[in-house]
Every structure is written in structure tokens, then in C-alpha cells.
Image: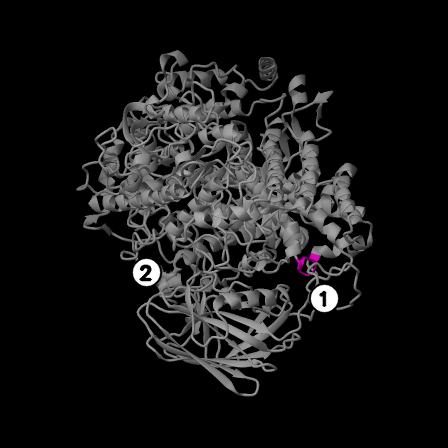
Amino acid sequence: MKFHRQQSCLLLTVLLLAVSVPLPADETTNLIRQYCADCHGAPDESPEGGLSLTADFGSASVRETGPTLKRVLDAIEAFDMPPADSEQPTVAQRKQLTEGIRQWLAMPSLDGQRDPGRPVLRRLTRLEYNNTLRDLLGLETDVFMFSERLPFERNHYQPESRKMPDRLTMAAREYGAKYPVLLREAGMPGDSRAEYGFSNRGDAQSLSAVRLQQYVRLAGEIAFHPELLSRAERMEELFPHARFRQTAPGASPRSKPLASSNTQLATNDNVSRTADGSAFNLEQFRERVDAAFAEDRGGVFGGEELRNTKIAGKGGLVRVAYGKNAIRTFAINPNEDWWFAPFATANESSGDTLLANYKKGQRKYELTFQSTSEGEFAGISELGVVLLSRHGQEGTILLQATYGNDTSHQLTVTLKSGAGADNTFAAFAAPKGLFIKRLLIDGSKFSGDYVLIDDLAFITGDKPNLQPLVQAEEPVVVAIPKVEAPRAKLNRNIATQSAEKRLTHFLRRAFRRNIQQEEVAVYHNLYRGEIESGAGDESAMRSAIQAILASPSFLFATYRRHPAAVNGDRMSPIHRLSDYDLASRLSYFLWSSMPDDELFEVAAQGRLQDEKVLEAQVRRMLRDKRSIELSENFFVQWLRLPELWTAQPDERQFPVFYSGPLGKRTLAQDMFGEVLLQFQTILVENRPVTELLDADYQFINSKMMQYYGRDVTELKKFADGGELFADDQQSDRVWNRVKKFDSQRGGLVTSPAVLTLTSFPHRTSSIRRGVWILDTVFNRHPPAPKVAVADIDEQEGATELTLREKVERHRENAACAVCHNRIDPPGFALENFDAIGRWRDQDGDGVIDSSGALPGIGEFHTPEEFRALLMTQERRFVQGFAEHLLSYALGRKLEYFDVPAVDRIVDRTVKDDYRISRLILEIAKSYPFRNVHVSTNESEHEE
Amino acid sequence: MKNKSVSFGNRSLSRRALLRGAGVAFALPWLEAMRPAIAKPTTRATPKRFAWIYIPNGVVQEAWHPQKTGVDWEMTHSLEPLAPFRKHLNVFTGLDREFRGGTGVHAQAGCCWLSSSPPTEALDGGFPVNTSLDQMIARQIGKDTLLPSLELSCNDHTNQKETRYFENISWYGPGYAASVQKNPRDVFDRLFGKPDPRVRSVLDAVLTDARNLERSLGGADKAKLGEYLDSVREIEKQIQKAEQHFTAKNSFKTERRIGGILPPDPTVPRRQDAASTSPIRRPNGKPEDRGEYLRLMMDLMAIAFQQDLTRVATLVIDPERWDTPRIYHGVFDNAQNHHVLTHTKGEEAKEKLKKIDRFHVSQFAYLVRRLSEISDGEGSLLDHSLLTFGSGMGNGTVHDYNDLPIVTAGGLGGAIETGRHHRFDKTPVANLWLTFAQSAGIETGAFADSTATVPEVVA
């Protein structure tokens, strides 16, 4: 069969050759023979690199020769080939070669058409999964915490304004710190990236029982989440009595609590004893708290969610929601500034945050427990706490509980020195009928400046709440106005319809396509089965939701066979994407999420194939806030920015990188923010993508001012050249757009972020930087070495040489030189920037020589000249960028047959001043984006 | 043991919600599950167990490989933590694997350690990965256990900077990695969770959906969807087996051996609950301390073997390359970058590498000790196991695949002769793997690029 297909392809190619403009194929073939075939001879002559270029390319099927031709094209365009010591083609001949090959690659290669490519079936990435559930269910948070979610606030991103503010606030939480999600304990392993590609590729993913089991479990935890009906707005379309942002019937209305509680009392297993005179020992109290928590009358407050915050001693309150339903709250009022932080010299008894006095030396403070306006709180009847021992400090701490009648009870604990060595539990029980009003912590006789406690465990005198978790099944009519206007236009009428209709509505959105009747039946049967076994409507519906969220149609991005994919009278392997599939491809490209209602609607009306409609949708979607994912997902993966979070420059050489308690505050977040804001500006203001190579502006905050050694008086506002606010020197949250101030730098290549993430902790790596530039800027990654060799900058017996000399010595080996002629020079050009990207003139005692040459482009002597050379390669940069973005949009590796599509995208982008929205639009309109190669058994038979 | 002494993960979920939600929920009492319910030692020969533990980036070979061969081999600096068990060990030198050009040298070292296809075969984008040895053996001996195999990893880097070829050593087939579990709590739940009958109806529904979908997909997509279908079937099987565990709970109380088997050890987090007879409590998550994390995963492996929940396991101690610094608690004061150290000149770096090697070996020694303390039929669990510890790279500095560091422990129920240092000369490591495959009962004359067996180790 395969043979048969090749024949027909060949025949078609020949036919097309006959009717189209005659190609200068022979000339190109001759040039290949002239300049390449000496080394790349016939397959039986052991050609160089195993690559033979003696085929008759002009008449061969491009399906067969395409991959080879693409390699040849890349090598010629990059001036890798012919090698420098060989005869070189003239400029005209080079042009002839590349244009000739491009024409070959544009030939039809599949069923008389160009191959639109075939992405491997893929599942949603972690990020897409969370975004999709957010939009599907109408959640205000992620489902679980995961490391790809950037720790930056997003309020500044207002694409509808088409203007980035010149002065904006972008706060960041510490990377890895917790943030509000639906399921605090849940998670899913990260997604592997593809080699030289993105994580949204099926060929880079695996699915096994372990992972599927996690999906099933997560689906269940979401579907049966006790707060689903009040935290997921879209549930108002599915459940008649769902009320967004309102608590369940019977519970008191609740504003967002500052902190929640759990039952995790001293889970770190480092509490060694219970204080003398304590009302309970730790084990007893654990059981009591567990029981109280289950009945909504107790919990444990460990400060985790408030990490690195301070509660003011005057007027500050911590509201704590407690119990498994978190429907009751009380407030803690400290009389001195209170602090939630990690301490390296102590071992927290749970989590990694402890509670301490904020002011150094303020070792005595009192906590008052009071009710809030949010409903019942009888008072605390039993209270436990862990006193933490600390490295190098010791002494006696007094605890005093004061009861409602102003009587009190005291405990003293003498702590030995050592982090976690003498963590001690102590508990109070109020006399019958009384409650604990205040807790005094007095460490006046403790040798340290801070008194550290953890795990404030409390049991209230509240009545047990024995309500079932899944709320009452009957609709409860409560007319309470919405807090805010709904974000999505909800169709609440659906909620009053039959289960089947509700399921159809939900399925269509969950599966992002039209639903067949028999598909609805699958989940409707599940629903009915539940009802028959005694469940109510709500519970049965939740079961159906669980199944839907675990099904492959939800978890995978699919491109289904189009029933109308007919070429003449037979099924073609090339399918135009259906409207729904196109809508999904578009929304995962631009938003990393599912289509919204409007896009669905356009798809449902069958209008998305209309280029004008498609264009209007793309423009609309780019102005939607969700387009921030192009920066947070695509851009971040493209530059490999996540590696910045884990970079650990040597603390002795680069102390400036670290600040704050324990050196936990690093410059990684500021460097990251700087390039992120640059890209977001291009996106929001529809600027040329070439600004990534050089721009006349940049964003800067106080930390980066220090880093660059500039202050507010030296920097000028980008908009009017005026001065910055003096205050802006102080805040790392405030970012100003300023005029470019450093002629040594410009663009991503010289950004501190990139220079740092391509360095080792102790030194720079010219090879890493060179490879990064080839990969990222030009998308022409060097192939993996053919032989197993040591890292090139680690040569034997070369300790006396400079890094550059070592690298150059290695390059004398011809086998290495082929790639390293391309890799090394860009790396050398950046040697003036140290391992955290600061300018330097010397490396140790040696003066830095940053000269070099880029093959076929020119020579440079300084980083500035190097960047000037790069700027002459705008088209190649845009081509590399377009290839990366197209590969991301398609979820597959690009192939030889994509060359014409990329060329077209680049041509049109160049004509439109390199503007990013043009590039994105042209990708959305491109042939491989709107079509797909679906190999079916049927079509293979018919070919 | 009472319900409430197990710490439930999610505060905001009710028991009911949990039972519905969890694929295999960790419902209690689970002690009944601890008794090997399916394969009873009294009615059958004691099963053989296999484990592979992977360390990345090669080792400092001069401090690792002994010179003297046979039973009199001298203890080396790096292997010293294993000294108490030397009669249970085999140490190998001269086993090599051939590098196949065109892929990253680190990635291939890891992903092809147990699947070294001959250099002529490149089935997965240039990577010669194939069904790995552990999976072949799992298909042979893992049919009756709760899980055919267990794939664990202590790669807790969050930056996802490398591809899956760096962190997977276990492959169902070319391009189809057996995903690793990294969170000890998830492993625990998978081993000891009680099956939730409701999940059955979820699986029924999604299976129907998958079949509908399959009809509308093309050939290549069907293959990928096959991973989903396989997974559904495996979960179904697992539920079935877990149910058998939970229904067979007659003789547990008289068999009180479980509590005593794993003696209290300060390195294993344990509740101060004297009444608890559980060998291990449900972990809260990943311990911060590196050694504690590794040993907890090994404890889970040991318990899975002891309870006969699985007979085949792999553990990736760290992934290849992934040069992100990490803290080795109690070994260094600050974070170290294993990969970068292998390419750093000078004695200081070498000394650090030796410390890392020794640290890893001592963790392996912990597993060996654990298994030696657990009685299993006649003898210890170690006697019936074959644990292989090593790397797919020899010398990380030059990225070669020669003289791979490989140490095995355990006699596999008398099938393997132990106590020796075997020296070979440029022999494919696949020869050793072939020998192991045969000792698992697989009737084959070749594995990957093997040229022969290694009869020296066969008892």
C-alpha cells in the first residue's frame, strides 16, 4: 500500500510540474551537486554525516526528499555549509539554491495538496487544565497549585486599553509560596517539555494508570467539593439552587476569611514533649481537635496562608475560618505587631511558617480572641499551642490564658537551645462555663529576640454542625443580590430544565464541541443510575460531572475527522478543521484555555471559516485579559524563564542576588518581571516583535535600579522624559517605563534574566549562551553531539587558559567546529556580562575579548557591535520567532512542509512593520493552523 | 486503629466526598489490606522481587570500583556503606553500553539504561528506548499483584527544564514512558487505598467516551488514545485486586507480624500513637530532608514488596543532568549542582562528588538493610529480591558509558550467587539484563543489544 501511495504522489508531482511555471530545478540540482556532493556523495560512498545529496531532487517526490531538503536549506541559510574551507557559492548562487529548495518544499506532498501536518493527540497541560476548569466551572481560582503559575499579580495587564501603563504595580509572591486554590492538597505532576519545543505536544507526553487515577480523583474532589455551588459561578446553570459567592442555607454569610484552619496539628513530628501542667498532651489534643474540626467547632491555625505578612498590633485582626466547612469564623487581635514567617533557625511544627512577634525584642504580647460580625462563635474553650525551640537561644516562656471572668491560668516552659530540638506542646482548658478570652505569651526571660510559636489549636464551645457536607438537595429560595456583576452571561434557565438538557449544555462546553445524543446518554445513564440507587438530583449530577471531567474528550485536545472531508468522491487525509476544533485551537493558542461563549457561538453558526470573522475573533481575543497567557505560557517557555527560579548564583560572588530574611528574596523575580513586562507591552500595544532584539524603553523597579546602579534621578520616564517619583526608589512592586539608559544593552539577549539563566552558579558559560541564542533567537538548535564528549569548556590540562582559549582550542577539531563555529561566537560576544548579567571588563585577571564573527553575517568586536549585527538579521529573528509560535499554536514540531506557511507569515509580518498582532493573525489564518492531516485507515486504502 | 488518626489531606472535604472523589480512596481501616491477601506464602513459593535504583551523571570511578575480583574484593570508599551486606552483594566492572549518536548523551544514559536497543534501532525520535527490562519482568511476574510494577522518583525539581528522557528509566514501549510518582503520599494512597466502588461507574462512562472518540480519530491518534484505554483497564484490574485484598481479612489478627517487621527508626516519620500497628503512616507529602525523602520512598518500596502488592519497582534517585542545584541535607552546607560538579576541575569538586556518591550508596544501603530485616518465607525479603543500583553513565566528566557503576544486592531466592566482584571486558550491560530476565522466568535468548548471558552470577 505504501508503495502504491508513493507512486501516486510521484505521479501527481510530475503532473503539477508540467502545468505550473517551470522551476529552475535543474539549476538548483546542479548547484547542490557542485557544492555539496563532493562530501555528501552517494549513499554507498559513506557520505559525510551519513547525508547523501546525489538524488535527483527536481523529479523526486518531496514527501521523500523534504526532510533532507529542509536540512540543506537550514545549513545554507545559516552559512554552516559549505564549510569555510570549501569552495563557496556566489551570493547569486546561494540565493538560487535557497529559493530553488523553497520552491521544491512548496510542492504538494499529500493527496495533491500540501501536507498540513498531524499533531499527536495531546492532553491539556497542567496550566491548560486549570484554566479550562476555571472557565468551564466559573471558578475564581486555580484548582490546585502548580509551579507554572507565575507568582505575579496581573492587574496591570489591560489589553483592551491597548496601552501598558507607564507606571504600574505588579506585586509578586515568593516563588513556591502558597496561594488560594480550590483544592489545597491536590496536585498533578508537571508536563515534560518536548525536545526543542513546548510542553503542549502529544509526543512529549505520556499517560499511564497513575496519572489517569489522579485525574479521576481530582475530578471527584472537584465535583463533590462542598463549596462547588458557591465558588463556581457556572454551576448556576446546572444546579437549581446554586448561588455563586453565597454560603449554603443555614450557614452564616461569610466574607472572604483572611485565613482558614485545618486539623494539621504538629504534623512535622518534631514536638518532643508536652509542658508540665498542660491540660492535654499532644496526642489527646489532636484527637479532640480532629473531632471538633469535623463538627465545625474547631481547628488549627498555622499561619501558612499569611506567610511573610505582618498583622498590626493596633487595629490588626486575623479572621480565621474554622471547621471542615469553614463556615464559622472568629478573630485574633494581637496587642503588638504579629508576624507569620519561616525561620531558618527553628523547625516549624507544621508547614513552614510560624507565628512570632514582629518587632525585634518585643518578646511579650497578648492575643485576644473575639467574635466577628459573621455569625456564631461561642468562644474558645480549649486552646493548644506549640512553643518552638531555636538554635542558639534558650530560656523560659510564660503562657497565660485569661478566662471570661478575668481569672487566669499560667504555664511556664523552659526551652533548651536547638532548632526543633525542644519543641513543646502546651494546652489550656477553660473551666466549665467559661471561655478563653486572651492568651499572653511572655518571653521576657528567653534569650532570643523573637518568641516563636506554631499551630494555634482551638476548640470552641459552638454547637456541633452535623449537616451533611453536600448541601440540601431541595432548591432554597433566597433572593440576595449579587456582590458583583457576573463575569459570564449565565443562562440560569438551563438549571430548571431536565437533567438531560443540563448535561447536554455542560458537555458541549466541557468537550468544546457538538455533542451526539449517544454521548449524552453515557452520562445521563450514570446520572439515572445514581438516582435509582437513591441519590438526589444534586448528588447524581455531581457524579456525572466527575465522569465528564475524567473523560478523554475533556482531557485531550482532539481534532476529529470531519465528515465533509471529501476530495472529489473520496475521503481525503487532509481535513479542514471543523468550526469547533478551530475555535479550540484558537483559544488554546491565545488563552491556554477553552473557547468562551462568543467564540462557541460563532463556531456553532459555522462562521469561523470566514476569514473576516476569524480575524475579528483573533483581534477580540487578543484584547481579552486571558491573552496574558501568551506571555505567561508561550513567552516563558520559549525563553526557558522557569530556570531562573531555580538559578542559584554563588552567594559569595554574587551576594547582591540575595536579600531579605534568609536570603530568600532573590533578584530572579525582578529579572523575570523585567522581560515579562517587555513582552506584555509588545502584546498590549501591538508593537514590533523586533523590539525583543532592541527597544528604546524598558521597565524598571527599585531592585533593578540597584542592580543597574542607577537611581531615580538618572532615569527618565519613557513617555515625557520627566523624572520618576522619588518614592519609586523604594518599592519593588512599582515598575516604571523608562527610556533606554544603557547603551551596552538592549533586548532579550542582554537581559539579566537570560544572562543569568544561561550561566552556571560560579561562572558564565559561553556555550550555554551561544546555544540559547541559536535555539531561541534563530530556532536553529545545533544537533546533539554525534560523539560522547566532555563539555567543551572543560578540557584536560587547560587550567592555565582563559575560558575563551579553552573553547577555541576545542574548536580546532573539525568535527566539533561545524556546530561550534555557530555556537561559540555569540557566547563570546556576551562574555562582558557576568554570571548574573552585570557588566564587567575583566574576568579575573584577564581582559575580556568579546570579538568574533557570525558566519555569513559579519565580524564584531564589542557586544554593541554584536547586537548591531543581530539587528541586521531582523527577518531571520522574526522567522525563528514565528516558527516557535506556530509550533506552539499547532502543538507539534514543524516539518519541511511548513516552510511555505512560515515564509508567508513572515512576509506579511515584515510588511506590517513586524507587528505582533499581524504575526499572530497570520498564524491563525495559515494553512497548517486551519487544516489537519488525519490519517485514517480508510483514506490509506483509498489512496 | 481509628479513622481519625490518619490525617486526611483535604480539610474541606467530607468523608463522603472523599469516598466518592478518590479513585482509590485512602479509606480505613486499611490494616486489613496490609496482609498479603492474594499470594499467600504458605500456598506458593516465595515470590521473586526486582528493583532498580538509578543515580545520574555517573560516579567517581576510582573511588567506586574495586580492583580485586572474586570474593576477596576490597571495600572501596564509595561502596563502604554497603560493607555489612557484602556477602549479599555483587559488584560489576567492565559493563558498557553503546552510545547512539543524535540524542543528548545524558538523556540517553538514563532513558536507555534498562532498554538499550541495539544501535541500529531508533524507534522513538532517535532514542533507542524500548520496553525496559523492569516492564518485561513485570509482565512476566507481576500479573497477580495489586500493581504490576511501581515507578518512583525523587526528582523534585519544579522547573521542568528537561524532557521526559531525562527522568524516566521505565518504559512500556518506545515513546511510552511509565510515569513516575514523586509524592510519597500519592504512593501510599495507591498502595493502601481502599477501592471506591463508585469509580467503577466513572470508568465505565469514560471508557465508552474513549471508544466513541476512538472511532472519530485517525490512526496515530488512536495509538495515543491507546495509552488512555490501557490506563482505564489497568485501574479496573487494580480495583478488582484491591477488592480481593479487602474482602480477604480473616487471619490478620493472629498474624500480628506486620507491626514488628519494620522497627521504629527515627528517620521514618511516625505518629506517637503507641496503639498503631501500621508499618508506616500516611505521609503528609514530600519530606524536606533529602535523605528522609529517599528513605521514605524506599520504605514504601519495601512495604510494597513485603505485602506482595508489587514485585517490580524502579526508583530514580535523581534525573540525569537537570543541573539545578539541590540541598543534600547533612552532607553539604549549601546547595550543590551534581551535574556541574562532574564538569568542574580540581580535587574540591571530586571530593564533593565522592560525598554525593557515598550519600547515594548509603541510601541504597538503607533499603538493603530494610529488606534484610523483613522475614519473608524462609529467609529475609532481601534473600528473595534482586536490587540493582547504578547509573547509565560511567564517567560523567567525559560522558562515557563504559565501566558503568552497577551493584546488586540479594540472591533472588537462590537464583543469583552473591558476594563477588565481577570484572568484564567491554561487555554489554544488556548481557546482565538478559541474565536477570531469564532468572525471572522469561524464556528468551536475547535482550536489547545483548551478546550472551552472564553465567557467572547464576547460582
**Mark 1 crowdedness (10 Å alpha carbons): few <14, some 14-19, many ≥20:** few
Q: Name the spot of residue A486 as percent of width and height, x first.
A: 70, 61
Secondary structure state at the residue bearing disc 2? helix
Which residue is at 35% across, 16% downward?
A38
Q: Label 1 is placed on what type of residue?
A: Lys
Task: Give yes or no for residue A940 being in the magenta stretch.
Answer: no
Q: Badge 2: few (under 14), some or many (20 or more) residues near its Cα, within 10 Å? A: some
Which of discs 2 and 1 lies nearer the camera? The answer is: 1
How many numbered badges does the structure rendering display? 2
Closer to the camera, B377 or A848? B377
The label on residue A482 is 1
Q: Quadrant of the C terminus of chain A?
A: top right
x then y, percent, for residue B61: 26, 36
Residue identified by numbered label 2: A656
| B192 up-or-down from A473: above or below | above
- Residue B236 in picture, x, y percent from top left: 63, 37
Residue extending furthest toward the right: A497
Q: Amino acid under label 2?
A: Val
Q: Name the chain letter of the residue that bears numbered label 1.
A: A
Q: Is residue B356 placed above or below A790 in the rendered structure? A: below
Q: Quadrant of residue B84?
A: top left
- The answer, for residue A512, to whether it is visible in the render is no
Region rendered in magenta = A226-233
Name the chain under label 2: A
**Disc 2 to disc 1, how far (Cα)?**
49 Å
Report if residue A12 is visible in the image.
yes
Residue B368 occupies quadrant: top left
